[in-house]
Image: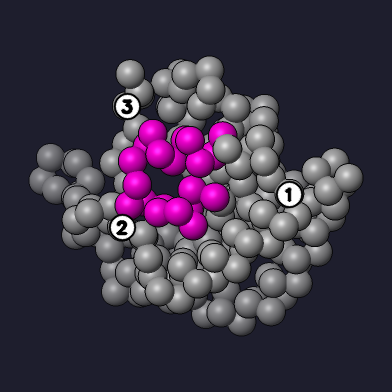
Amino acid sequence: MYRSFFKRLFDCLIATIVFIIVFPFFAVITILLFIVNRGKPFFFQERPGKGERIFKVIKFKTMTDEMDGGGKLLPDNLRMTPIGQFVRKTSLDEIPQLLNVIIGEMSLIGPRPLLVSYLPLYNETQKLRHQIRPGITGWAQVNGRNAISWEQKFEYDVWYVNNYSFLLDFKIGILTILKILKSEGINAGESVTMQEFSGCD
């Protein structure tokens, strides 16, 4: 019953309530990022959701679009603004995804939606992560986030797909809050973002 009905109901209710509560922060961050990112406070990117259906994920834009002399984007750490670094460190950049949850493209908890370009690289087991809606947070995120390997991350994702329940989602929610407070696992080594997935042997 939880999988077929209550998970989606809880997603809608909780996401709506949380968005209303954090809306003042949402508005202030939007204004600040609008200024530092030259009119672009949000980051939109196509991601595969349930059944590999493509949707546009919404996040706060934490990096500028500055390029070098050859027209190539500068490294992540050089494009990260002070406000962007704060927003990313506190995971506030995920707030806009509450809108993805409310309209049914995402869940609060599930495998994170990754790049569309990764779809041909998954093996048959890894593809199982797309049997359910992707989440803002998930089992992989509370077990290392960007600090673990892609192989470990996919193992956690598939395990979640096969085992999720109300109690597991509740546990992940609590652990996520603790992770945010401790700012654990946000960066992968010296990089601002996780290295791109290139397939598994």
Name the chief secondary structure element in magenta.
Answer: helix
86 displayed left or right of 189: right
In this rendering, is residue 177 above or below 186? below
Hey, what amino acid is under mark 3? Ser
The single residue placed furthest to the left in the displayed view is: 69
Residue drawn at 68 percent across, 62 percent down: 170
Q: Where residue 189 sits in the image (x, y, percent)?
A: 22, 54
Secondary structure state at the residue bearing disc 1: loop
Front of the two marks 2 and 1: 1
Residue picked out by circle 2: 187
Name the one closer to the observer, 27 or 160: 160
In this rendering, is residue 87 above or below 146? below
Q: Residue 162's image quarter?
A: top right
Q: CA distance from mark 1 to mark 3?
A: 31 Å
Residue drawn at 72 percent across, 57 percent down: 167
Q: Which residues are magenta?
A: 139-158
Residue drawn at 43 percent across, 27 percent down: 117
Secondary structure state at the residue bearing disc 2: loop
Q: Where residue 27 sits in the image (x, y, percent)?
A: 57, 76
Q: Where residue 81 sits in the image (x, y, percent)?
A: 29, 68
Residue picked out by circle 3: 198
For label 2, count other residues whose C-alpha is less than 10 Å away and answer few (under 14), some (14-19) or many (20+).
Answer: some
200 displayed left or right of 34: left
Residue picked out by circle 1: 165
Hey, what amino acid is under mark 2? Asn
Q: CA distance from mark 2 to mark 1?
A: 29 Å
Name the one closer to the observer, 109 or 144: 144
